[in-house]
Image (cartoon, rainbow, N blue to C red):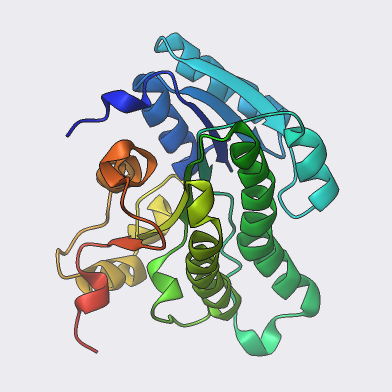
């Protein structure tokens, strides 16, 4: 089964001004999806939309803050989407002993509360349309296993995985599928310099495939969860990590 059913659909991608969010938006745009890109910085969104249009796709920008319920509701009022890629997130690395309340709140509010607020708003539109839809929450393998100095991040991503299951159960009868994609270490502009260091090389050596993932390594899983190919999947998590989760302790 291909992904031709995506053509003509509409999608919202959060955290879409760069990184994986922009990659997912470009991917969907190439497949004929009308993509709405959301983030806090409008200038970066406009450039991202232009990149999609340059490839013949259809793209729009909406400025919102996923941590602010009022911002989310106002930005998405009256909008309806077939697909949501709930991608906005931050890492917040640091020792738990040194993490202050504001640092904790920044990570958990963005990564977990933000996922809930956007999913809630988009699901309301899906429910009103009567056609349902697909929600793909971007979690992490850190939601399954912890790593040093990532306490808030790991807790938030574990919350995303369990929230995914709870929403899938609650919204199944509305024909809304809710699944989670859990990337491992994916090379992006943000982390490329670190993984070129000795410390980064040691981390890569612990991955069974002995390499970082590329953004395009996530494409198959994302499209499966977003399209009719995954029509009988809800409450599922897919790990794309080069075997990292099954590596020995």
Residue 145 location, quadrant:
bottom left
Question: At which x and y percent is residue 160?
Answer: 53, 66
From what the image shows, is residue 210 above or below residue 18?
Answer: below
Does residue 124 appear to the left or right of 56 in the view shown?
Answer: right
Question: Residue at point 42% right, 58% down?
Answer: 180
Number of numbered discs overlaid on the protein picture: 0
Question: Residue at point 44% right, 14% down?
Answer: 57
Question: At which x and y percent is residue 29?
Answer: 42, 22
Camera-side residue: 249 or 161? 161
Question: Residue at point 39% right, 57% down?
Answer: 234
Residue 105 location, quadrant:
bottom right
Question: At which x and y percent is residue 117?
Answer: 70, 54
Camera-side residue: 175 or 96? 175
Does residue 86 appear to the left or right of 205 in the view shown?
Answer: right
Q: Is residue 3 visible?
A: yes
Question: At which x and y percent is residue 209?
Answer: 14, 63
Q: Is residue 190 visible?
A: no
Question: Residue at point 69% right, 45% down?
Answer: 121
Does residue 245 appear to the left or right of 108 in the view shown?
Answer: left
Q: Quadrant of the C terminus?
A: bottom left
């Amino acid at each position: 089964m291909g992904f031709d059913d995506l053509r003509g659909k509409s999608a919202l991608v959060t955290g879409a001004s760069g990184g994986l969010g922009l990659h997912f938006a470009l991917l969907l745009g190439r497949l004929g999806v009308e993509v709405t890109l959301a983030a806090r910085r409008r200038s970066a969104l406009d450039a991202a939309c232009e990149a999609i249009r340059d490839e013949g796709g259809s793209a729009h920008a909406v400025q919102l803050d996923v941590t602010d319920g009022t911002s989310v509701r106002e930005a998405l009022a009256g909008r309806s989407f077939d697909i949501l890629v709930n991608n906005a997130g931050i890492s917040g690395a640091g020792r738990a002993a040194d993490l202050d309340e504001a640092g904790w709140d920044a990570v958990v509010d963005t990564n977990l509360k933000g996922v809930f607020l956007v999913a809630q708003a988009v699901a309301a539109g899906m429910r009103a349309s009567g056609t349902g839809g697909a929600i793909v929450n971007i979690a992490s393998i850190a939601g399954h296993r912890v790593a040093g100095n990532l306490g808030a991040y790991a807790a938030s991503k574990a919350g995303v995985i369990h929230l995914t299951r709870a929403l899938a159960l609650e919204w199944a009868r509305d024909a809304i599928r809710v699944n989670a994609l859990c990337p491992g270490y994916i090379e992006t502009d943000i982390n490329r310099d670190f993984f070129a260091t000795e410390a980064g090389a040691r981390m890569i050596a612990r991955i069974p495939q002995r390499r970082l993932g590329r953004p395009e390594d996530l494409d198959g899983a994302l499209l499966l969860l977003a399209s009719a190919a995954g029509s009988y999947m809800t409450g599922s998590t897919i790990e794309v990590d080069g075997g990292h989760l099954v590596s020995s302790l």
